Image (tube, helix red, strand yellow):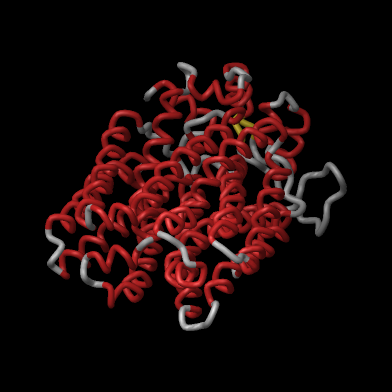
Amino acid sequence: MATTPVTEHNEPSTPPGAPATERERKRLHTKLKLATQIGQGIDGYIIGGIGLAMGAITDDLHLTSVEQGLVGAAPLIGIFVGGPLFGRLADRFGRRPVFLIDMLIFLVGSVLQFFVADGTQLFLIRLVMGVAIGGEYAIGAPLLSEYAGRRGRGRLLASLEISWYLGYALATVVGALFTSVDGGWRWSLASSAVIALVCVALRGGIPESARWLLSQGRRDEAEALIEKYGIEVDVAAELDERDEVRRDGFRALFSRQHIRSTVFASVFWAALVLPYFAIGTFWTDVFEALHMGDNAVAALLVYSFTAVAGVTAGCLVVERIGRRRLLIPPFWITAGCLALVAVWPSSTPVIVTGFLFFIFLNAASSALTAVYPLEVFPTSLRTTGVGFATAMSRVGAAIGTFLLPMGLDHFGAEFVLLVGAGVLVVGAVVSQFLAPETTDLDLARAARTAREGA
């Protein structure tokens, strides 16, 4: 039976245990949304920032092509560790403490980037920052989803991906400003500390998730939060899901109940981000291989904002057209775009148009990476599942980022683009068979739909 929001009060403040005023509720939701959006944007920021800085870093630190790949892939490797680790911690000990700790780790790492003396130090620091970002994926969006109502949840969560692309675009602007400055790459990379500091300040005072409290059997505490903040929760469905989920950690992800959700969330996410991350990190190298190196910086700025437009479009239509339609057709179209550039690399119009369509539609579908993984797992397994799917997505992205410069050296841009197209085809096929339609469903019922293959 769903617990309905209580009637709002108009008092300027509330005594302990009393329902919050409308102003307090809005303040909490705004604070949580901003804290989560900024956290999501930070990942885009550190990925986007390395693209324009890589040339200067290579010259100053004397990096080999292997070291370039490791520095570029370091955050992605870290996410592979941080996603499952922090996800499991958040399912076991609560959302609230993890939400703050991961950002504090990232803040320290941001500052330390300024002082690195060699490629090994930079790799290790960005690796730790990646661990913190993995925690951000595992806890940020799941916590926001557990406060959201069923209607409009997709648009709210998809807006987190707008933050990712805005972070990416902002990093390219900052990077471009520092390209002509001696040692400017240090300031560019360390600038993420400013964003992290704001994020840490926002996260103080955010309460625990009522859905998580229900999953732990702490019903009285959960219902007090639900009543105080008017949270839309189907309490009966949440309690039913708690009874059905086995408490055996990561192994539950591979049980007959949840393997379908685990495979789908991991594969579709990895297939979306692998080509984008790999090409974006070594954008200048790709354009030089296509004999358009003089236009690389300008094109990166244009395409970064094209991605922002794409993910914004995805956010706007995710509730209107449904999850499956936003995911499956763009997979096929973007695969065709990369393949077209690969087989016709001498045509500037084909290169420009192909990349524009690829980036716009890939970004539009990427709005679902902040939606689908949160909807296909029950509350007691949500951050563990999201953390694992995050890790798997970054495994693919890290492999692609690490191998791309060597692939360009040995096989050329055409081969690299065809591999990217093949990855997108795999994502399309898996999504066709495993993606559920979860639009307008309560989180508990969405997870059941995914599990039953409806």
Q: Residue at x 57, y 55 (%)?
A: 126
Closest to the observer: 356 or 157? 356
| Residue 211 visible in the picture | no
In x, y percent, where is residue 25?
69, 52
Classify 453 as above or below 11.
above
14 sits to left or right of 186: right
Q: Residue at x 68, y 53 (%)?
A: 105
Q: Residue at x 52, y 37 (%)?
A: 386
Closest to the observer: 77 or 136? 77
Classify 451 as above or below 132.
above
| Residue 75 visible in the picture | yes
In x, y percent, where is residue 35?
63, 56
Classify 249 as above or below 277.
above
In x, y percent, where is residue 182?
53, 82
Q: For residue 310, what is the image quadrant? A: bottom left
Q: For residue 34, what is the image quadrant? A: bottom right
Q: Residue at x 73, y 49 (%)?
A: 206
Locate the C terminus by quadrant.
top left
Locate the N terminus by quadrant.
top right
Classify 272 as above or below 226.
below
In x, y percent, where is residue 360?
31, 59
